[in-house]
Each structure stands twice: as structure tokens, then as C-alpha cells.
Image (cartoon, grey):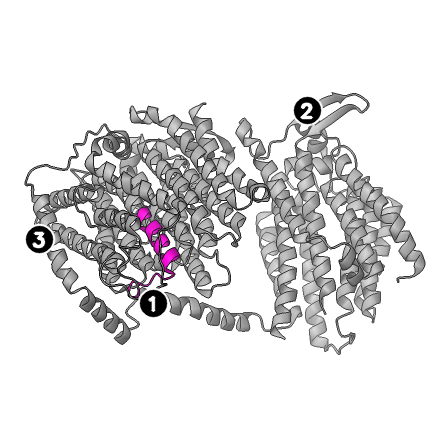
Amino acid sequence: MDSFNAIVLSIFLPFIAALLVPLVEKVIKQRVGWFSAAIAFISFILIGQVTHNVVEGHTIEQSITWLPSAGIEFGIYVDGLSMMIGFIASGIGVIIMSYSNGYMSHKEDLPRYYQYLLLFMGSMIGMIFSSNIVQLFIFWELTSITSFMLIGYWRSKPASIYGATKSLLLTAGGGLFMLAGFILLHSITGTFDIPTILHNPEIVQDLKAHPLFLATLILIVIGAASKSAQGPFYIWLPNAMEAPTPVSAFLHSATMVKAGIYLIARVHPIFSGTDAWFLLVGGIGIFTMLLAGFLAFRQTDIKAILAYSTISQLAYMMTMYGYTSYHEPGIGVAAATFHLLNHATFKACLFLVAGIVAHEAATRDIRKLGGLRKEMPITFIIASIAALAMAGVPPLNGFLSKEMFYETSLEMGHVLGGPFEFLIPAAAVMAGVFTFAYSIKLIDGIFLGKRHDDHLPEHIHEAPYTMLVPAAFLALLVIFIGISPSQAVHYIIEPTTAGILLEEVHLHVALWHGFTTSLMMTIATFLIGIAVYTKYDNIAAWQNRTNERYPWFSVNYVYDRIVNGAKYRAGSFAARAQPGPVKTYISAMLLLFVVLGAIPAFIVTATLIPDSMNFNVPAYEILILGMMIIAAVASAVLRKYLHAIIALSSVGYLVSLVFIYLKAPDLALTQILVETLTTIIFLLVIVKVPQTFREKISNTTLAKDLIIASAVSLIVLVLMLNATQGIVSPLESLSYYFVENSLPLAGGHNIVNVIIVDFRGYDTLGEISVLCLAALGAYNLISSRGDNQ
Amino acid sequence: MTTLITKTVTKICIPLIILFSISLLLAGHNNPGGGFIGGVMFAAVISLTYVVFGLKNMKTIFNPGWDRVFAFGLLLASLTAFAAIPFGHHFFRSAVAFVHLPLFGEIELVSAALFDTGVYFVVIGSLLYIFKTLGEDK
């Protein structure tokens, strides 16, 4: 298959499959998880199909037109970077969906679960392979939305709702900053196409010299940081742990949170090498990795420890991608990329283990667990492998990338000189120490020590194979990459690094490099780590005490204040802006319309009344017009609601009569039908309204109303007269274009319909969406009113 | 309003008007009609039956989830909008083909008709959803 088609198929296959899931579920019942795992596997194969080119050092770049008038294309760009993340997204997808077959109880709403998972996977793959930044943004926000739905999967749990809302507000909100950054990038470079920017050194050069460079960079980094839970945005990730555990393993450790890292790597060639890049990306990274590593101590829930550890590990990657200088723009790229791959394997594995433990022992609280090594030996081995890899113990893969991290830290410190020569490697070692401590805590807390009989079920046994095999597979991968890194490095890391640095890269990664400085740092890490581990509980207790004493000293506190305050503030704003009577709103809206309409009418258009007008109106039109005026006046002065409504609808029917005379049967038909329906709906509503109709109106109110009404009608008249100015002469028909083109361009004789579905199809799509929203709005209005009473 | 005469007339009218609404939908591309009008026609006849037979009676006989109907319509219309892209056409580009079938003669197949069908379902679903919500309100 053509590479372009293969990638496009791998993106859209999960979307199509998501639509099919409910049907498939009808046929194969709870085995539907295997269906989605198969879809993920097909996507994996499709991505695998195109990669031999990439390994040989080529990139695939192809696009088709989408919105050519806006310079937006639907394009894909396959290089080492997108290939690697594509493999992670689809590969871990296969593992997670297989595992879910064992994890999810058959009583759950399985189709919804797998639909969300597939939609998420499709959006993730779509985001990775996007060559156009607008397309990237759309898929990016889709991942935020699907993540929101997955975190809130258990809809009735308040904690799920809280976590889901938080993640949506922070990640999707950050995405909007990113969009602003992208728009700035577009206005500076003149293109939305990523490869075009990457492969033009002049564009990149101009960008770096541009006054808006810093603003663009900050906006894009905000987007990336919010998605990857970096800096002050980290708070959503721990709450996201309310999702089912396989979802956390998939989204919140292996794939979605890597989207921010991916974006940083993707724009690395564009922005890196500047001080701003190092300070922002590297700074956020160092800050987050130390903070999150430290905060992990006080967590008692296994998944919460893993969440903080994920934040800290992602910060490693941020830091390494941030390590750049003018002379060496790519110091940490290879190390970061390698760590990205390794983290996906060992962290997903740890989450799967957390799922197994919670599934079998019915608790995730590390204080209640302990001594499970005898009952769950296989899980114990798998967990130890993954946790030791995270701690950076040789010969596992985490050791290799951590060594590279230390090496690049030394190098970066050396480049910066001064106190940084010591500070940067020290920060790296400190982060390693924290990682070591909580990794050991995980194993110790769950599997070693004494069994807490009073908290745990009596008989705990191994999980079913559907859950063990995926975790074991990841553990094997951890060992395999650790012992023999050359394959992974050659087939994945080198092409990826080459994709980011835009030049050929050859890496030499091995377990043993001799007694290097970085090995010394590793040994120091282990020694300090063991020392810190002995004080683990004291540190946690200290953190808890501090938090109790100074509750405002936390980002969560600020977030809750803002979000909870939003309701109150919106309420007080609404009370001021919407005092009550509907009449006020309508007059406000009409006045605004008058002002907005009057400005262009008086300033822009030169003549208010066009020179030539067509007053050649036949007698029957004048007759209908007269009847319309009578009916309109009647609807305003009649004393009873029923009569007024009937007068009002007779205006509508008279308008349809005009349409018939003007030879527009379509419009007439529509008008009659809509009029009938609105009259019925009106009548339904009106019987519930108290029938006191005539209240006293003072003369001043009457005068005000009169002024507003006549101003509005005047403006409408002026607008009508000027509506077609410059296109055709006033009161002339503009239908000629459509009459001539409807058959050749759209193959239809009925121009009204052709306009609706072909020429202005996009408008129609918008309109029907509005119609759907209106229906939902009506439902909400009615049902929420019921709640209050 | 629910006299025997209105009830009988309504019963006769329902299938006829539904057929008419479908014919409006299908005729739309070349003759007066289209998804919007067809949908409104359909909604009108159903709301007529609601008025004549009462919401409570209707809910026991005929009570589809109108929200699903409009959701389906919106999905269909959006998918048609994107359908031309994989074939290298613009967003919203529609295709026309003339097929010759025995008995029916020449038939025109327009991809926009699918879009129109989406509109049809959205109109039916959302109007009747609003109608039912307002009618159910106490």
C-alpha cells in the first residue's frame, strides 16, 4: 500500500471502528475488547509498513487539499519522531486493550469504554503524523476531549467528574494558548506546514530574529507543558488517576502526556539553541522533576505515586530537550528520546501491575498492602523489573537512559560554566535520588514486609493471564532494551534523533562504558537514595504537616479557589448583567444591532439610498403588503394571547404567499411548514403562561419602545437597500450565478436546494448543529427549571 | 380538538404525509423539496398526532428517542462533508453520477443527497425533541 494511504488508514481506522463497536458488541458480547485490540494491532502494522523508509533516513511528506483558501491542508509527515510515538501509541494500545479484557468487569458499559479508547488512539495517531499545525491542533484537542471522557468514565463518581473537569480545563485550555502560538507562528513564517518550516533554514533564522519570537515560544510551551503536566499545570494528572487503571496506563503514562513532549521535540529544530528555549523548557523541566519527585513521597495510593513519578519522568525529558546552547543545539535530544521510549515501557508496565494489585487485593492504599510476594510471585517479579528500571538500576533500560541524562547534564553544565557546572548535574542526581526512593517504596510497600491481614482479603491469587501477559511482555521489553540496546537504538532512537536534529546521527549505547563520571553519579544516586529511603516516612510526614499548616501553599488550592469562585463570580456578574425582564434584553440586543448596523451604514457605504431603484411593483404585491401591515399591527394591539399569535402567524403565511408570487415554491413551502410548527409550539407554551396580558404602560416607556422600533426598522431598510451594493444593482436579482451554475457544478435543477447542500453546504452544517444545540438547550432549560422548584 | 373526525382524518393522513415528506426529500435536488422541508413536514405530522391523540397516549404507542435521531443526522451530514477528501477532492465537494437502471430509467445519484438526508434527520429529531420536551413540561 502507498505510504500515505497506509498512515491515513491507521489514523481513521480507529475512528471507523469506534462507530462499529456497539454493533460488534451485539454479536460477540464482552469479547468486544479483542476486536478493538485487533484494530489497534492493524494500525500498528500499518505504521510498521512505512517505517523501513524512515530507518533508511528518508521522510514521507504528502498532503491533500482540505481548506485551500486558508492555506490548510490535510497532510502527513513521517519521520523518526512521529514513527516512534506512533509505535508507542498503537503498540501500547494493543497491550492496553488486551489487558482491559481482564480488568473491566463484564457488567460495565464496555462499548462506551472501547469506543473512547479507540477514538483516543485515532486522535493520538492523527496528531503525531500531522504535518499541518491546524490539523495537529484539532487532533490535539481531540485527545484532550477523549481523555476527559475516559477520566470521567465512571460518571456517577464525583471524584471522576472532578478529575475529568480539571484535566479538560487545564489541557484543553493550554491547547488554546498553543493555538494562539501557532497563529503567531503562521503570521511570522507564512505557512502552516511544519516540514516547510523545518527544512528552510532561512525561515527558522528569520523567526529567531523576529520580535514576536519569545511570545510565540511561550504560548507554544504553555500548551506543551499543560498537556505533559509540567510546571504549575501538573495538578491535573494526579486527579486523572480516577480513570480506570488501563486508561491511566495508556493515556497518563505512555501516550497522551507524551504529546507535550512530542510537541517540544517537534518544534525543537525551530526554536532550540536560544537562551529563551533553555530557560523556559529546561527551567520548567528541572523545576518540575524535582518538585514532583519530592511530592511523590507523601502519596499513599499506588496510582498517585505513579502519577507523580510520571510527572517527574516527563520533566526529565523536558529538561533534556531543553538542554541546548547556541553552539550545540542538540545536547540532550538523543538521551531524551531514549528515555521517552523507556519510560513508555516501564511506566505502562507499572500501571498494569497497579491494576492487577487493586483488582486482586481490592485496595490501592500502600499502607494497607504488604507482603504479597508469596501470593503473587509473577506480579512481584514483573513489578520489580519495571520499578528497578525506573530507579535506574542496571542492566535494565532505565539505567541506560539515566546514564545518558547524567552525561548530558554534565555536558550542559560544562557549556554554561560558572556555578551551573555543579548545579545542573546536582539537580539531575537529586531527581534520580527521589526516583530511586519512590521506586523502592513501591516494591517494598506492596510486596515486601508483613502482610496486613486485617485490611486485605484472605485469599489473594494471581491475576488472569489476560492481565499478566501484557504486563510480562512490557517487562521483557524492559530487559531486552536494557541488555541489548543496539536494535532499539538503531531502528528507533537514531532515526528519531535524526528527525529532530535534521542530520544523520550515530549513537553508541552500551551497558558498560568504563568508570565514567556519569557512572560515579549513578553510584552516588544509589547511595544517597538508600539513605533517603530510610527517612522516607519522616519526609512524608513532614510534607503532610507543612501542607496542613499552609494550605494555600499549593497549586491545587489556587485551582479550586478559581474554579469554585468562578461559579460565584459568574453568578454575581449575571445578576448585574441580566436583571430579569426579557424586554430589557431584547431592547439591549436591538440597540446593539442598531449601533452595529448604523456604523457601517453611515460610514462605509457612501450612499444610503442607491441611485437606481426598481419601484415596478405589481398590484397584488401591494395588496399582500397591506394585509401584512394590518396583521402585524393587529398582533401588537390585540388583547388576548391567542388572537395575537394567530395574527402573528398570519403575517408568516402572507410572506409565504409573496414567495409563491415570486415563483419560489421551495421557500413558500418551507415558510408554511415552519409557520405551522412554530404556531403549534407557541400554543403549547402559551397555555402555561398566566393570561394577564395588558399591563399599564407609561408614556415614557411607550416613547422609548417607539424609538427603538423605528430605529431598528430604519436600519433594516438601509441594510436591505445596501445589501447587494457592488454585486448587482439594488433590488435586482442575484440569482443568475446560481441559475447558471447549479446544473454544471452540482448536478441539480433546484437552485435553492443546491445552494443549501452544495454551494453553501458548510453553512448548512453549521445551521443543523445549531438546531441540535437548540434542542438540547430547550431540554436543559425545561429540566433544570424542574430541579430548582 | 380531539373529536372523532380529527382522529380519523389524522390516522389517514399520517402515512400519506410521511410518504410525501420522503418524496420531498428525494425530489429535493431537482424539484421543490429537500431535507429541510421534508424534515419539517415529517415533524409537522408527528406533532399533529401529538396534539390530536395527546402526548400520554402517543408515548405508549410511539416513543422513539428523538435525540438519537438528530445525533444520527448530524453525524451523517458531517461524514458526508468529509467523504470527498480521501478521493482527493475538496471539503464538501459533491459527486454526481447518472445510473441507468431497468424499469426506473435514468437515475441520478448525488452525494449531496446523503448530506440532505442528514439534514432531514436533524430537523425531524431536533424539532420533535423540542416539541416533546415542551409538551411534557408540567
Which amino acid does the dot numbered 1 rest on?
His
Contact, mark 2 vs mark 1 (Cβ under 8 Å): no
Residue A104 coordinates in the image, percent (x, y): 46, 51
Q: Residue A355: say if magenta.
A: yes
Foreground: B118 or B53? Answer: B53
From this viewpoint, which residue is outermost toward the left? Answer: A515
Which of the 4 quarters of the picture holds residue B51? bottom right
Asked if residue A429 lies left or right of residue A606, the reply is: left
Q: Specify start and end residues of the magenta stretch as a single range.
A: A348-368
| Magenta part, dominant SS | helix
Per the rendering, the mark at residue A419 is 3
Q: Which residue is mark 2?
A: B97
Q: CA distance from mark 1 to mark 3?
A: 51 Å
Q: Is residue A376 left or right of residue A716?
A: left
Mark 3 touches mark 2? (CB < 8 Å): no
Q: Which mark is residue A455?
A: 1
Residue at the (55%, 27%) spot, across then down: B87
